[in-house]
C-alpha cells in the first residue's frame, strides 16, 4: 500500500526537496504551505504534488488541514515537520514579536502538526515523525537566540515523544541540517556568510536541500525501524553533537 507523507513547508527550500524525494521513493505526498500561493502553485504544476494552505502556528487550522489531506489521500503515516522561519537579530534588538513568531512556527508548530496525526499512528501501530531542527539548535548561534531556542526545543520534543511512540512502532527523529543553500541562508548578509560562516564548514561548501531530503527518505523507510529519538547531523563537519 502506498504510504501517505505530509510535509509542512513542503513547497519551497528544503521542504520542496523533501516532498520531491518522498514522491520519487513511492509515497503519496501532500505538501503544506503557509502563504506563498504563487510558489506553491508553481510547485504543484511542476511536481503534481497536491498542496494545502494553512498556518502551522494555528492548531485548529492544522486539525482542519490534516483532515482535508486525509480525506483526499488517506491516513498520514509519515509526518515531516519542516516548516520554519528566521527572524534574526542580536538578542538586544530582538522584539517580542520576533521571539513569538519563531517559537510559534518552529516549536509550537511541531505540537500543532503532530498532535492531530498521533492518535491514528497509535491505532495503526505505525508512524514516522521526522522534524527538521538545525545545527543552531545543537550549538546555538549569535543573532538567533529565538531560533536556537526553538530548534533545541524540537530536539527535546523528539526525544520525549520517541519514548511514547516506541511501543507502537512509531519512530520520532530529528535532522539537524547545517547551512544549506536555500533562501533562508541566502538572506544572511553576504559578508557574514562569506567571512564568518563558510570558513566554519570543513567540507568547504553549503549543503544542498537534496542531501537533507535523502536523510528524510531513510528515516521514513521501514529500514530505519530501530532508529528513534535520534538526531541526524548533516552539516559538512561544522559541529559534532
Ligand atoms: N558572535 C558574537 N558577536 C557577533 C557575532 C557573532 N557571531 N556576529 C555579530 N556580532 C556582534 C558584532 O561584532 C557587533 O558587535 P558590536 O555592536 O559590539 O560592534 C554586533 O554583534 C552587531 O553586529 P552586526 O553589525 O552584524 O549587526 P546587524 O544588526 O547588522 O546583524 C545579524 C546582526 C542579523 C544577527 C547578522 O549578524 C546575521 O544575520 N548573522 C547570521 C545569523 C545566522 O547565522 N543565521 C542563520 C540563518 S540560516 C538558518 O537559520 C538555517 C539553519 O538552520 C542553519
Image (cartoon, grey):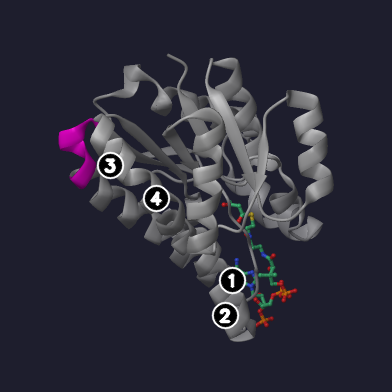
**Image quarter (top left, top right, bottom left or bottom right) of the N terminus:** top left
- Residue 11 x %, y %: 69, 40
How far apart are the two marked residues, 4 and 1, measured between alpha carbons? 21 Å
**CB of residue at label 3: within 8 Å of ligand 1?**
no
Most common SS among magenta residues = helix
Mark 1 residue crowding within 10 angstroms, few (<14) / some (14–19) / many (20+): some
Q: Is residue 122 visible?
A: yes
| Disc 3 target residue | 229
Image point 45% across, 38% down: which residue? 79
How far apart are the two marked residues, 2 and 3, measured between alpha carbons? 30 Å
Task: Say which mark, if any, is on residue 91.
Answer: 2
- Residue 72 x %, y %: 57, 32
- The earlier-in-sequence mark between 3 and 4 is 4
| Disc 1 target residue | 101
How far apart are the two marked residues, 3 and 1, measured between alpha carbons? 26 Å
Above or below, comparing residue 63 to residue 224 in the picture:
below
Magenta stretch, residue numbers: 164-169
Task: Say which mark, if any, is on residue 116.
Answer: 4
Residue 168 on the magenta span: yes
Closer mark to the observer between disc 3 and disc 1: 1
Q: Quadrant of residue 152?
A: bottom left
Residue toward you, 188 or 153: 153
Mark 4 residue crowding within 10 angstroms, few (<14) / some (14–19) / many (20+): some
Above or below, comparing residue 112 to residue 10 in the picture:
below
- Residue 172 x %, y %: 32, 40
How far apart are the two marked residues, 1 and 2, measured between alpha carbons? 15 Å
Residue 237 on the magenta span: no
User: SS of the residue at dot 1?
Assistant: helix
Mark 2 residue crowding within 10 angstroms, few (<14) / some (14–19) / many (20+): few
Above or below, comparing residue 100 to residue 210 in the picture:
below
Amino acid at each position: 500500500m502506498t504510504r501517505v507523507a505530509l510535509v509542512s513547508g513542503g513547497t519551497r527550500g528544503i521542504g520542496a526537496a523533501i516532498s520531491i524525494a518522498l514522491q520519487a521513493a513511492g509515497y503519496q505526498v501532500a505538501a503544506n504551505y503557509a502563504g506563498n500561493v504563487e510558489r506553491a502553485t508553481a510547485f504543484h504544476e511542476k511536481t503534481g504534488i497536491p498542496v494545502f494552505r494553512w498556518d502551522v502556528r494555528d492548531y485548529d487550522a492544522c486539525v482542519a488541514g490534516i483532515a482535508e489531506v486525509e480525506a483526499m489521500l488517506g491516513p498520514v503515516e509519515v509526518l515531516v515537520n519542516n516548516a520554519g522561519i528566521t527572524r534574526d537579530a542580536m538578542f538586544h534588538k530582538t522584539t517580542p514579536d520576533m521571539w513569538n513568531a519563531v517559537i510559534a512556527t518552529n516549536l509550537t508548530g511541531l505540537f500543532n502538526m503532530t498532535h492531530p496525526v498521533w492518535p491514528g499512528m497509535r491505532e495503526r501501530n505505525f508512524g514516522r515523525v521526522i522534524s527538521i531542527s538545525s545545527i543552531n539548535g545543537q550549538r546555538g548561534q549569535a543573532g538567533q537566540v529565538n531560533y536556537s531556542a526553538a530548534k533545541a526545543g524540537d530536539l527535546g520534543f523528539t526525544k520525549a515523544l520517541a519514548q511514547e511512540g516506541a511501543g507502537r512502532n512509531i519512530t520520532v527523529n530529528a535532522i539537524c541540517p547545517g547551512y544549506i543553500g536555500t533562501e533562508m541562508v541566502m538572506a544572511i548578509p553576504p559578508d557574514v556568510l562569506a567571512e564568518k560562516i563558510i570558513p566554519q564548514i570543513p567540507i568547504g561548501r553549503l549543503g544542498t536541500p537534496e542531501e537533507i531530503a535523502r536523510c528524510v527518505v531513510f528515516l521514513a523507510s521501514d529500514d530505519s525501524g530501530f532508529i528513534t529519538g535520534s538526531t541526524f547531523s548533516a552539516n559538512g563537519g561544522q559541529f559534532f553533537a
